[in-house]
């Protein structure tokens, strides 16, 4: 019996879809059977980020409305041998085409066959959000170090805490620019975690490679040389229960002098 | 057996006090009250208004009965009822009083979009994040950081106070007074342990916690000690 994890944020554009794609990919790299579910009906993106757009035949709404079987709609990722699947959202209808109860049943069915179901949630707190969290056992809240994103994350956490059957959510801080955080122009990691007072499960640096990779339809997690990739792989390992220390954000100043200064605590 | 009086009139410095016996029937009481007051009006004909306190002892009077007695007394030209004093408290009144005097403790985060409203005092173990609201008919004490909105004395109690370990509210409301944070967000952390109360000129003042000891001595409920 698998576990369903919903990736949500409240605010749009903080990287829910990218995070979903990469956590899913990283879990599959760890040898787990993973099914990604895109619940952003009407504005589907996850298939594009995964590079699976061309293979879609049926979608989530087709499954819910009984036009096809679940396994017919699932798109297999050829890069993984039978490990990673995607259930794409519909593009032609909208979020009201699905009810939370139906979603719950679908996710429960999927849990029989997969180790992890990663649910990509749409922005907002309306029907689409309610559908996305309906079947989830765990939740990951994605935020960026911006006041508006943190505010919305706070709201979402409040809503998730009221939900029965979902464990206390975990936090991912995305798009961290270490130089801005150091200069105090951006909220820093500690500030955000104490403000939201939930467990941090990962931090991801702002990396141009992420955008490049998703434009090519290849989740960054597949590229072992990127810092963001490592961050997502670490998140996946933490989901699997390993304890992995947080990445050093200022790993780029590797000069000998700065290391010595750091050693003596000089700033 | 000697028949005792059901209505006794006593004069005090502040006016008249009517003691109404609580063992006789309501009808008897009404008749005797009417008779007694009719007698006594003859004595003082000058039209100076006289305030009367009515003490009904252990008798339970419904609202209608109370009105009836008040009417009866008012009809005697120069009497006005100042208050009706009773030893009897209905269950609802008692429960309301108890709730108003209670401290409701709550251990959780108040997040954006959440509203918590309590009757009585609120003791919050946790933070109020921006966009969150706490309301209490009494005082509000926050052990964590207040970054959202707090509304103390929301049923109109000007004496209510707000205290927080970290006071960085977006808005403070006490009774019908509102005070908001300055538009230019000051970066200073704010001194730890601050309180807010309404001053004499009806303004919300934020000051160090210890000021409350002088400003609101009624906050103390503890009796005894050494």
Image: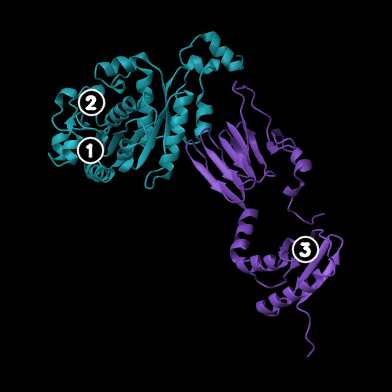
Chain colours: A cyan, B purple
* Residue A174 point in image, percent of width and height: 41, 24
Point out which mark residue A199 bears.
none
- Work out which residue is located at the far right of the displayed protein and give it: B13
Q: Give the class, few, some or many, for how many residues have Cα within 10 Å of label 3's Cα (few <14, many ≥20).
A: many
Quadrant for the N terminus of chain A, please. Answer: top left
Report the residue marked by disc 2.
Answer: A47
Q: Label 1, label 3: how many angstroms apart (C-alpha)?
A: 72 Å
Tell if the residue under mark 3 belongs to the same chain as the one under mark 2: no
Determine contact: label 1, label 2, CB under 8 Å. Answer: no
Q: Could you tell me if residue A246 is visible in this image?
A: no
- Rendered residue at 48%/35% (across/down): B112
**Front-most of B120 and A216?**
B120
Q: Residue at x 68, y 43 (%)?
A: B158
Instruction: Please name the residue shown 31% across and 43% down the image.
Output: A134
Placement of B199 over or under A185, stated as above or below: below
Q: Which residue is mark 1?
A: A97
Q: Residues within 10 Å of mark 1 (few under 14, many from 20)?
A: some
Q: Residues within 10 Å of mark 2 (few under 14, many from 20)?
A: many
Task: Please check whether the numbered discs 1 and 2 fall on a single chain.
Answer: yes
Q: Chain of mark 3?
A: B
């Amino acid at each position: 019996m698998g576990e369903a994890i919903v990736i949500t944020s409240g605010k749009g554009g903080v990287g829910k879809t990218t995070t979903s794609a990469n956590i899913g990919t990283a879990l599959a790299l760890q040898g787990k059977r993973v099914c990604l579910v895109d619940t952003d009906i009407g504005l589907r993106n996850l298939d594009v980020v995964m590079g699976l757009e061309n293979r879609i035949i049926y979608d989530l709404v087709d499954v819910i409305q009984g036009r096809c079987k679940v396994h017919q709609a699932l798109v297999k990722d050829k890069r993984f041998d039978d490990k990673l699947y995607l259930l794409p959202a519909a593009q032609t209808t909208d979020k009201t085409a699905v009810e939370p109860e139906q979603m719950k049943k679908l996710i429960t069915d999927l849990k029989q066959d997969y180790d992890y179901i990663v649910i990509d949630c749409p922005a907002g707190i309306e029907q689409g959000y309610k559908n996305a969290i309906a079947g989830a056992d765990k939740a990951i809240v994605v935020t960026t170090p911006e006041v508006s994103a943190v505010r919305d994350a706070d709201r979402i956490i409040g809503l998730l805490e009221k939900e029965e059957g979902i464990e206390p959510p975990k936090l991912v801080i995305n798009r961290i620019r270490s130089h801005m955080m150091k200069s105090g122009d951006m909220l820093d990691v500690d500030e955000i975690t104490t403000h939201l007072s939930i467990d941090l499960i990962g931090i991801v640096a702002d990396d141009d490679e992420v955008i490049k990779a998703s434009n090519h339809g290849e989740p960054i997690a597949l590229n072992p040389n990127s810092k963001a990739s490592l961050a997502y792989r670490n998140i996946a390992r933490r989901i699997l229960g390993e304890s992995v220390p947080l990445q050093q954000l200022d790993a780029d100043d590797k000069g000998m002098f700065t290391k010595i200064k750091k050693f003596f605590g000089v700033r | 057996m000697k028949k005792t009086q059901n209505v006794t009139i006593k004069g005090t410095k502040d006016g008249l006090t009517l003691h109404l016996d609580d063992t006789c029937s309501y009808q008897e009481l009404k008749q005797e009250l009417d008779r007694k007051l009719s007698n006594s009006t003859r004595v003082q004909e000058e039209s100076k208004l006289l305030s009367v306190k009515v003490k009904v002892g252990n008798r339970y009077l419904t609202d209608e009965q109370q009105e009836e007695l008040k009417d009866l007394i008012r009809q005697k030209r120069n009497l006005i009822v100042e208050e009706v004093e009773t030893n009897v408290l209905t269950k609802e009144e008692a429960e309301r009083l108890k709730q108003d005097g209670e401290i409701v403790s709550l251990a959780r985060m108040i997040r954006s979009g959440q509203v918590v409203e309590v009757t009585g005092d609120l003791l919050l173990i946790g933070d109020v994040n921006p966009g969150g609201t706490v309301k209490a008919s009494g005082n509000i004490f926050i052990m964590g950081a207040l970054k959202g909105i707090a509304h103390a004395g929301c049923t109109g109690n000007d004496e209510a106070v707000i205290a927080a370990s970290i006071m960085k509210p977006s808005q403070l409301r006490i009774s019908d007074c509102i005070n908001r944070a300055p538009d230019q967000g000051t970066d200073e952390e704010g001194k730890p342990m601050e309180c807010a109360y309404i001053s004499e000129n009806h303004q919300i003042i934020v000051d160090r916690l210890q000021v409350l000891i002088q400003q609101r001595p009624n906050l103390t409920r503890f009796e005894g000690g050494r």
